[in-house]
Amino acid sequence: MHRLTGQDASFLYTETPTVLMHTLKIQIFDSPYDPADYENLKDYMEATLDVVPMLRQRVMFVPFNLHHPVLVDDPDFDLDSHIYRAALPDPGDERELDRMISQIMCHRLDRQRPLWEMWIISGLADGRIAIVHKIHHCLADGAATVRFLSRLFERLGGPDALARHTWYPQPLPSGRRLVWDALADHLKHGIRRLPAFLANMWHSTRDLLTFNREVGSPTIEMLVSDKPPRTRLNHTLSARRSFSRRQIPLAEVKVVGAALDGTINDVILALAATAIREYLLYYQDLPATPLATSIPVSADAPGAQRELGNRTTYFPTRLWTNMEDPLERFKATQRSTRIGKDELQVLGKDTFLDLMEFIPPFLSLWKTRRKQRLRLADRPDYHPMTNVIISNVPGPRERVSGDYGTLIDLYSMGPLVEGCGLNITVWSYAGNLNFSLMGCKKAIPDIERLADGLLNAHAEYKELAASAEQVTQSREEETQ
């Protein structure tokens, strides 16, 4: 039995029929589909159950929500309920695959079973296949999933890739056992850690307030305390999702970043800001103030490797969509991001994780149910916590190969939260930046327009970078 951390459990507490807290990992292989692939994958996953316990474990809540839920072996585990097959209709192009992925994303995982699914999708153009992993966020964040998928893919190498073991599930724990273990964990760990947690929160809050008073001009560097504006992206979610993917060469992004004296992440944020700006302009919904976003950051110690759970914190920044000039937009977003990173450094990466550990489960569940019941995100006075979610996760630098052939492309997609109808997740793989865009279909019915805006923004910043390089070369020639 494994107890979820506060952050792991938060993804269960915030889930509703319209707020779906699972993630997708999309792997596209160059090999044609063979019916034997399905049986081979089932055999391999069955052999993996002993090595990766989360694949066979389901969630159980503690009676009266006295503590965070636990993962326990599912005595009714059935692998056929987790691995599926689907075929795209002709012509099997990228648009058809994106539509299939959006349908997979729309359905909530059954909490009476282990919270994952795997889909083999055939019928892609050029004879390729896609394997889509659907995993609840309470089981793994981006860093853990990278490690899990890397090990999984490396071992898809034949019938002897894993030694087979037989696991025997224990009966589900009784409610009395769950309550007893919850109280014991509180006594052993929670109460003992509480004084240090309160002291750390006091010092972190004091340091953050001091930092916010001393940093720059608030008219230029809008901090986390400022309320972001509301746009068409920020309403109560529906259960329907729209999905699209785009790809940009990493080398070109590096050139833009070097020419504008920025990082890859700075360029990604600038591309997102530009695409969202044009999208909101099209709908005449562009606010006069910048948008807000929160950037996920790993809180793992250097060199740590996980295949389970979450250790992710966030820092706030602004997307200066209200600025017409692309260079000013880039620099302002860059400055806001730098301040957001400094804020996180002052606050501490572990502070947010510790806070979530001590928030009572019943309070989190009450807040979620109240927000859903009252549809607070549709009220005129609603201010979103963030306008858009943007993630950037580094993946393998070289193409990898296994039993299913060469992995051509790798994409990832995170969830939406109530009041925030757009998520942009970027994974680097084999020399490309792979952008996945997922929106609430009610807020973004035409996500292709927004996705194309990323490519248009990239072309605009490439021209800007070329002009900056020419100016630099001219100055160098003048000084010689």
Image: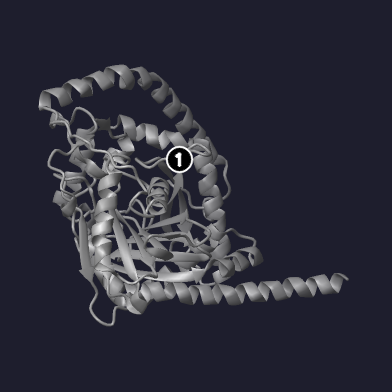
- Is the residue 228 above or below the residue 243 in the image? above
Give the residue at x 43% y 34%. 351
Give the residue number, with chain letter if any, for mark 1.
305
The spot of residue 417 in percent (x, y) is: 29, 53
**Is the residue 136 above or below the residue 267 in the image?**
above
View extreme (right): residue:
480
Depicted 270 relative to depicted 309: above or below: below
**Which one is nearer the viewer's eye here, 339 or 130?**
130
Percent x, y for residue 290?
44, 61
Question: Is 288 left, or right, of 363 in this rendering?
Answer: right
Q: Quadrant of residue 238?
A: bottom left
Using residue 162 as the reference point, say whether residue 326 is left or right of it: right
In the picture, measured across the screen, residue 423 lies left or right of residue 205, that is left
Q: Residue at x 18, y 54 (%)?
A: 108
Residue 288 image offset from top left, x and y in percent: 42, 65
Circle 1: residue type = Gln
- Residue drawn at point x = 55 percent, y = 64 percent: 330
